[in-house]
Image (tube, rainbow, N blue to C red):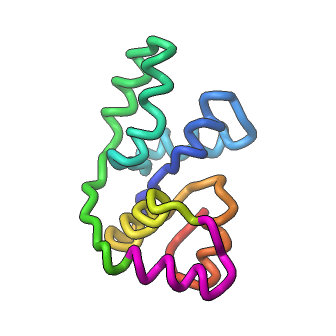
């Protein structure tokens, strides 16, 4: 199993949130991954705090390449809208597509991913 860790989980982790232990377990098992979209969401804030050690560690995590299928992104958005799931941002749909394309499991604290999993098949923890 390879788990794509969403920025919501990283933010919780850096704040020593309730999911810190779960992420620690996945890190110890060496089954986590990221992509440049997720890194672009969290690294700027870490840079502001001048924590280059954490940034270096994040860049050592397995990075999944992004191969954006824009037609799929449109399809996912239409399916969400048809099912009353509104306000899903394009970055989240790109993350969803990345998970599906690479047969990954998504670890996210964003509730809309749980809603989406009811209409689009993908692995989520």
The residue positioned 59% from the left and 55% from the top of the image is 108
Query: What x and y, as percent, mark residue 86?
Result: 64, 71
For the C terminus, which image quadrant?
bottom right
Tell me, yes or no, whether the highlighted magenta stretch contains residue 80.
yes
- Front position in the image: 8 or 22: 8
Nearer to the camera, 51 or 22: 51
| Residues shaded magenta | 73-87
> Depth check: 104 or 8 in front?
8
In the image, residue 107 sits, relative to residue 81, either above or below, namely: above
Q: Quadrant of residue 53?
A: top left
The part of the image, by quadrant, that contains residue 10 is top right
Name the residue nearer the viewer: 18 or 22. 18
Q: Is residue 85 above or below residue 54?
A: below
Is 98 left or right of 116, judged from the image as shown?
left
Q: Tell me where residue 85 appears, x and y as whole percent.
A: 66, 75
47, above or below 115, in the image: above
Residue 2 higher or lower than 14, as above or below: below
Q: Is residue 46 magenta?
A: no
Task: Specify the quadrant of the image occupied by residue 44.
Answer: top left
- Majority secondary structure in the magenta region: helix
Q: Residue at x 65, y 56 (%)?
A: 110
């Amino acid at each position: 199993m390879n788990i794509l860790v969403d920025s919501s989980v990283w933010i919780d982790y850096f704040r020593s949130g309730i999911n810190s232990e779960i992420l620690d377990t996945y890190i110890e098992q060496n089954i986590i991954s990221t992509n440049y979209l997720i890194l672009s969401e969290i690294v700027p804030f870490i840079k502001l705090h001048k924590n280059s050690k954490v940034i270096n560690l994040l860049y050592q995590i397995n990075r999944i390449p992004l191969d954006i299928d824009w037609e799929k992104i449109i399809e996912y958005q239409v399916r969400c809208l048809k099912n009353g799931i509104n306000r899903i941002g394009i970055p989240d749909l790109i993350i969803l597509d990345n998970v599906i394309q690479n047969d990954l499991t998504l670890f996210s604290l964003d509730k809309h991913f749980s809603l989406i999993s009811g209409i689009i098949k993908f692995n989520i923890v």
